[in-house]
Each structure stands twice: as structure tokens, then as C-alpha cells.
Image (tube, helix red, strand yellow):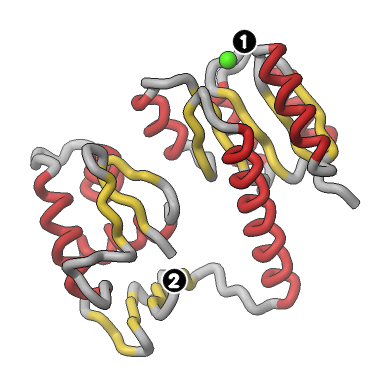
Amino acid sequence: MSEKILVVEDEPTLVETLEYNLSRQDYEVITAMDGQEALDLARREHPDLVVLDLMLPTIDGIEVCRLLRQEMNVPILMLTARDEEVDKVVGLEVGADDYMTKPFSMRELMARVKALLRRERLIRQELAAGTIDQQILTSGDLTVDLSRREVKRAGEVLNLKPREYELLVFLVRHRGMVLSRQLILERVWGWDYDGGSRTVDVHVHWLRERIEPDPKNPRRIVTVRGVGYRFEG
Ligand code: CA
């Protein structure tokens, strides 16, 4: 059975392009042109993935994303116009799984859709097989046990400081995403923290010393020039 993708976008030509390209990859495509229609359709059709534009009539993409997250476990790929950095932060906070800025290449979108669906399939399989423990995050030889607040590397316990631990959990949970220093500060240190983005850099430096095979050439916590960091793995 082909996977069902809900495309939510109010630009008719982009809807058409997305529908055409996704259908060609044998996905079943349903479309909505405003936020309310998107919610109605998602509730009725239970899509396997949602491609969601940010700026929409009736209910905007952020609100649609938030409501979908509360109601169902569906991967969400958000689309936004260039320079909506603020919205990008909000998009991550309300739980979008991935994010693309317009204009994007259709090829890249297809690759991300495929990756999100594959990840979702794996999670479902693991859940069905009972092999997944939601309390444990893993990445390569790293294991983060959320219930015990314990981090292990290659089986060995790392004694991280509380803030290093929080930072690592945040990075691993948002693996593959570009996270700005500002977002990291807000989420790991709290909204009212008075320090600068240097604080983030210092903690990333410490964390790299603990979890990178070669801290001078980090492979896990990658620097994204002028923005922040991305966790790979
Ligand atoms: Ca739009």
C-alpha cells in the first residue's frame, strides 16, 4: 500500500508541482490549501506524512503543526519563505520534524520525505517488535538513558555536568537539524538566561571533549557557520 502524504500549501503552482512529483514516486497525495482544511483532512485521512507550509489562510502552519502534534504521531516537514528565521525557531518548538526554506530543489524535498518516512517506518517496526525503549536515546556508541540521566559512551558512563547533559539531550533529540545558538540558549538555559551565545560555544567545546573521538575534528556536533550547531548521528 502506498504511503499517503498530505500537502498543505496555498500557492496553487507549488501544490501542483508537489503533487506531480510525489505522485510520480508512487505516493498517494492529498492536498489542502488552508489550515482548517488541512486539519479536517488530516483527522479524516490519517496521512503518513505532512508537508506543511508556514504561511496559510485561516489557521497558520505553526498552529496546524501544534494541533497535529497533540492529536497524532505524524512526521511533519515544514516549508517556509526565505528569511523567516524567527518562524524557524517556533517551527522547531511546536514539533516540526524537518524544515525547508523556499525556494528548494524538488530533488532535496523528495530525499527528505523519503528519509522521514523511512525513519517513521523503522520506529514503528521497533515499537511493534518491542525493542525500542522510549527512555533511551542512542547515536553510534552513545547511549542516553533519560530515566537515569545517564550517558554512556561505548558502555562507559560519562559523568556530564547537568548543563552538558541537557545540551546533549537537546542536540540528540533534534539530530540532523540546524540549531541556532539563540534557540539552544532558550531551550537549554531557559528564556531568562542573561548570558551570551559564547556560553553555548563553551559548553559545546566541553561536550565535544567528552563525546567526540577527535574533538578537534568534530563529527557529531558539527558547527554551522554563522548559525549554530547540528548533531549528526
Ligand atoms: Ca503560503
The residue labelled by disc 1 is 57
**Amino acid type at mark 1:** Pro
Please give the label number shown on residue 41. none
How many numbered discs?
A: 2
Q: Earlier in the sequence, mark 1 or mark 2?
A: 1
Going by the image, does 191 lie left or right of 25? left
Between 18 and 229, the one nearer to me in the picture: 18
Residue 44 percent location from the top left of the image? 84, 33
The residue labelled by disc 2 is 139
Q: Nearer the viewer, mark 1 or mark 2?
A: 2
Q: Can you say whether 231 is above or below 89 in the image? A: below
**What residue appears at the point 41 percent right and 31 percent down from the top-left corner?**
88
Residue 28 percent location from the top left of the image? 85, 38
> CA–CA distance between discs 1 and 2?
39 Å
**What residue appears at the point 41 percent right and 77 percent down from the top-left corner?**
143
Question: In this view of the protein, can residue 140 be seen by the observer?
Answer: yes
Q: Can you say whether 208 is above or below 25 in the image? A: below
Residue 153, image quadrant: bottom left
Q: Is mark 2 within 8 Å of ligand 1?
A: no
Going by the image, does 213 lie left or right of 42? left
Q: Are marks 1 and 2 in contact (CB under 8 Å)?
A: no
Q: Can you say whether 87 is above or below 229 in the image? A: above
**What residue appears at the point 82 percent right and 35 percent down from the top-left corner?**
23
